[in-house]
Image (tube, rainbow, N blue to C red):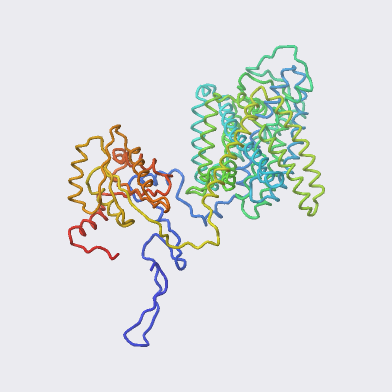
Amino acid sequence: MIGGRRPLQGRKPADRRVRVERPHAPYFRYVGPGQMVAKAAAHEPKTTVGRSWARIRKAAIGRPLASEEEAGERLTKKKALAIFSSDAISSSAYATQEIIRVLAVAGATALAFSVGVSVAIAVLLAVVAVSYRQVCRAYPGGGGAYAVARENLNPLLGLVAAAALLIDYVMTVAVSTASAIAQIVSVEPDVEKWTVEVAVVVITLMTIANLRGLRESGNIFAIPTYLFVGLALLMVGIGLSSILTGHAQPLATPNAEAFPPGTGLSIFLLLKAFAGGSVALTGVEAIANGVPAFKPPEAKNAANTMGAMAILLGVLFIGVTIVAHAYQIQPTVNDVPTTVSLVAGTAFGSGSVLFVLFQASTALILFLAANTSYNAFPRLGAILAQDGYMPRQFSYRGDRLAYSWGIVLLSAVAAFLIWLFGGKVTALIPLYSVGVFVCFTLSQIGMVIHWRKVRDSGWQWRLGLNAFGAVLTAVVLVVVVSVKFVDGAYLVVILIPTLVGIMLFIHRQYDASRRELSVRHDLVFETPHREERAVVPIPGVNRAVIQAVNVARSVADDVRAVFITENPADGVEIRERWERQVPGVPLVVVESPYRALTGPLTAYLDVLDAAWPPDKDAPITFVVLPEYVARRWWERILYNQSVKRLRSALLGRPHTVVVNVPYRRDDPGLFEQGDRRASGQEPPPNP
C-alpha cells in the first residue's frame, strides 16, 4: 500500500479509527489511489558523476523548474519586446547599409533614391505587421506562418513555410552575430582577425542564457535592447535636427569602396536595392510564432508588442537612411566602418562617450538579435515535433522549461555557418530574407482563406488587407530571389525542398510505427499462453552468469546456456564445470572457427526456430545477457563490449526478447538468493 486510508480496530468493539497514510519515501507525493507525483528528489541523480554534472548544470542554467512554474516564466510586453523584437529592431543597423551598397554602383546621385527605397520597405513593413497582428489573434497557439498555411492551404505548404522559417532563424543568428562583430571592428580593428572565435564564444553564451529559460533571458537582454533603442532615437533626432538647421554637410567616408564607372541607374538596380534593404523585415514574424510565451491575455499582448516593434523599426530605419543620405555616406570595404557607426559619428562625434556607448549597445543588440531565433526556432521545432515532422526530442522541455534540443541545434548550425563564411556579413546576407518572404506570402494567402471561413466582424477589410499584402510580398519574393539568386539565394531555394523532404520522411516513419503499434480499442488482453524458452549466452562460469541463469529460470521452463568458443579445449573445460555446478540447465557448446560471436548465436537461434513444429506458433525466446556493472564510469569501457554487440544484433529479431541482467559488486541480489537455494539454506519459491 503506497498511501491512503486504513481502518484500525482497537481492543474494544467500539474502538475503531481510520489512519490516513502517506508514502514514507521522500520521492513522491500521494494524490489518489494508484497515483503519485514525483518530487524533485526523484529526479536527482544517484551516482557521483551524475551529481557532479547536476551541480554544474545548476550553476550554469539554474535549478530545475516544475511544469506548474511555467506561468511564472511567461513574459510581460516589455520583456517580450526585448526578446522577440531585438532581431527586427537591430536590422536597422545594417539594412540601410545594404541599400547604399547597391545604389553606390550607379554613382553618388543614385544614393538619393535610398530614402525612397527605405520608405517603400517601411510601407511593406506596415502591411506585414498589421497582417501578423491578426495572425497573433487568430492563432494564439503559436506557429505563425506554419500554422496558418497548414490549416488553410495544405500540410505541404505548411512544411514549406516551416522550412523557410527554420532557415531564416539560423541565418538570423549568423548574420546578427557577424554584424555585431563588425560594429566592434569599427571601433577596434584588431578584433577582425578573431571574428570566428568571438562569434563562437558569443553563441555559446547565448545558448547558456536561453537554456536558463525565458524569464532569465528577458532579464539579461532587456537593458541592452532598450539602451540601443534610446540611443538610436537620440542619434536620429540629432541627425534630423542638423539637417533641418542646415548643419548637415557631406563628409568624406573613410575606407570608402571604389566602384568602376559606367553603371547607370536602372529599375533592376532599384529592385536590387529594395531586395537588399528588405532584410529589415526579418524577425517580424517571430512574435506570432511565440504567442504562448506571453502573459495572459496572450494574443492581445503579442499583437500590441507587434505594433510597438513595427513603429520603432520603421522610425529607426527611415531615420538612419535619411541621415546617411544627408551626409552622403558611402559603402566601405568589408563594411568597416559600418554605415550606422558613421551616422553615429556625425551625430555624437567620433570618439565621444555617447559614440562608444552607442557602438557597444549596437553590438550588444545585434548579438541579442539572435535571441529572437533562440525563442522562435525551438518553439517552431516543438510544434513540428508534436505534429510528427521532427524528432520527438524537440518537443521535450529541459530543466528550465526551455526546448533544449532546438536551442542546441540552432547554435551548432549557426556557428558552422559563421565558420564556413568566415564571419563576413556580405557573404551571409544573400542567403537572408528569401525564407522570410516565403513565409510572409504563404501566411497572408492562408489568412485570406481564414477570413473567408470565419466571416466574423470586420472580416471583409481584413481579407482585403491580407490579399493586398499577399500580392505585395509575393512580388517582393520574386524580386528577392531573382536579384539574389546568383549571389547565394540558390542555396536557400535548394535547402527548402530538402528540409521539406526530410520532414516528410520523418512523418512517414512515425506514421508507420504508429500503425504497427496501434491496438484496437475493443480488444481485451488476457494472460498469453504462448510457449517460452530462455537462452543464456555465457562467457564462462561466474557470479554474473549464475544470476542471469536464475533470472532465466524465473521467466521460462525451457532454459539452456550457450558457450561460443574458438578453442575446443575451452569448451570441454567449461562443460565439465557447468554440469557439476549448474545441474539441470543444459549447456550447448558452439565452436566458432572464424572467431565470430553474434553470427553463431543468431544462427543457433534460427536452428531452434526451424526445429519447432510448423503447425504451432514459434515460442518467445528470451535471450538473457549477463552484464557486469563496473563501479566507475571509466571502468565501463573495459567491460560488456560483447554484450553490446549481441544486444544490437538481436534487437528487432522476430519473437525474441533481449533481457539484460546487470550484476553489481555491491548488490549481489539474485545471485545470493539462488546460491542459498542451491545449498539448501532457502526453500525454492512456490510454483
Q: Taking 336 as reference, is 106 left or right?
A: right
Q: Where is residue 404 in the image (x, y as percent from the top left)?
A: 50, 43
In the picture, residue 120 is in which quadrant? Answer: top right
Quarter holding the C terminus? bottom left
Asked if one can make out residue 322 in the rendered structure from this viewpoint, the answer is no
Considering depth in this image, is 149 or 260 the residue closer to the camera? 149
Considering depth in this image, is 183 or 233 the residue closer to the camera? 183
In the picture, residue 584 is in which quadrant? Answer: bottom left
Q: In this view, does 515 lie above or below 89?
A: below
In the picture, residue 649 is in which quadrant? Answer: top left
Q: Position of residue 467 (x, y in %)?
A: 79, 41
Q: Which residue is drawn at 34% across and 53% down?
A: 533
Q: Where is residue 29 in the image (x, y as percent from the top left)?
A: 43, 63
Q: Taking 666 as reference, is 618 left or right?
A: right
Q: In this view, does 161 lie above or below 274?
A: below
Quarter holding the N terminus? bottom left
